[in-house]
Image: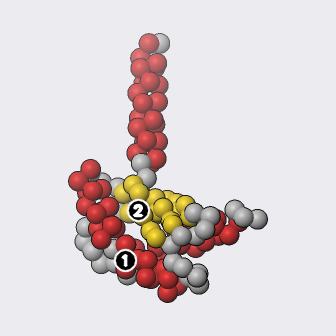
Amino acid sequence: MTKVRPNRVAEQIKKEITDILYHELKDPRIGFVTITGVEVSRDLQHAKVFASVMGSEEEKALSLEALHKATGFIRSEIGRRIRLRHTPEIVFKLDTSVDYSQRISHVIRELQNEGGDRS
């Protein structure tokens, strides 16, 4: 039972932040950003928001910087949209799992191509 509420709150925060990014924020530094997950502490005081950013390393850094600058606005919007006693502190983290999976796929394709050359 103790794990259910933080999970529900995390999913709601993910949904609302996605909506805020696409409809409210107009910062041109925010490129193609996808919110991939949210982890909320058991006491609902802290939320880690994982964002995947497409583009070069420079574009990723700019997008993450813009997200950090917009944290106050995003947090106030979350507080307005979700009924909680306290709005969690939000920290954005870069989700590199997409990059990692693309790298693994690339390595597998290379290995398969090398195996095809031997026959």
Total residue callouts: 2
Residue 27 place in picture, x, y as percent: 27, 74
Label 1 crowding class (10 Å Cα cut-off): few <14, some 14-19, many 20+?
few
> Which element is circle 1 on?
helix
Report the residue at 27% width, 56% height from top. 61
Residue closest to the eye, 60 or 2: 2
Direction right: furthest residue: 1
| Mark 1 or mark 2, earlier in chain | 1
Q: Residues within 10 Å of mark 2 (few under 14, many from 20)?
A: some
- State the SS at label 2: strand
Give percent across and percent down for residue 8. 65, 70
The amino acid type, in three-letter code, at marker 2 is: Phe
Residue 59, position as x, y percentages in the image: 26, 57
Residue 52 versus residue 6 in the image, above or below? above
Tell me which residue sits at (46%, 18%) in the image.
Answer: 115
The image quadrant of residue 71 is bottom left
- Residue placed at 50% from the left, 73% from the top? 88
Q: Position of residue 87 (x, y in %)?
A: 51, 78
- The amino acid type found where label 1 is placed reads Gly
Which residue carries the number 1 mark?
Answer: 72
Q: CA distance from mark 1 to mark 2?
A: 12 Å
Where 34 sits versus 84, above or below? Answer: above
Task: From the viewer's perspective, tell me whether residue 1 is left or right of residue 96.
Answer: right
Q: 112 or 70, which lies in front?
A: 70
Q: State the quadrant of the N terminus.
A: bottom right
Q: Which mark is residue 114?
A: none
Q: Nearer the viewer, residue 86 or 31?
A: 86
Q: Which residue is mark 2?
A: 92
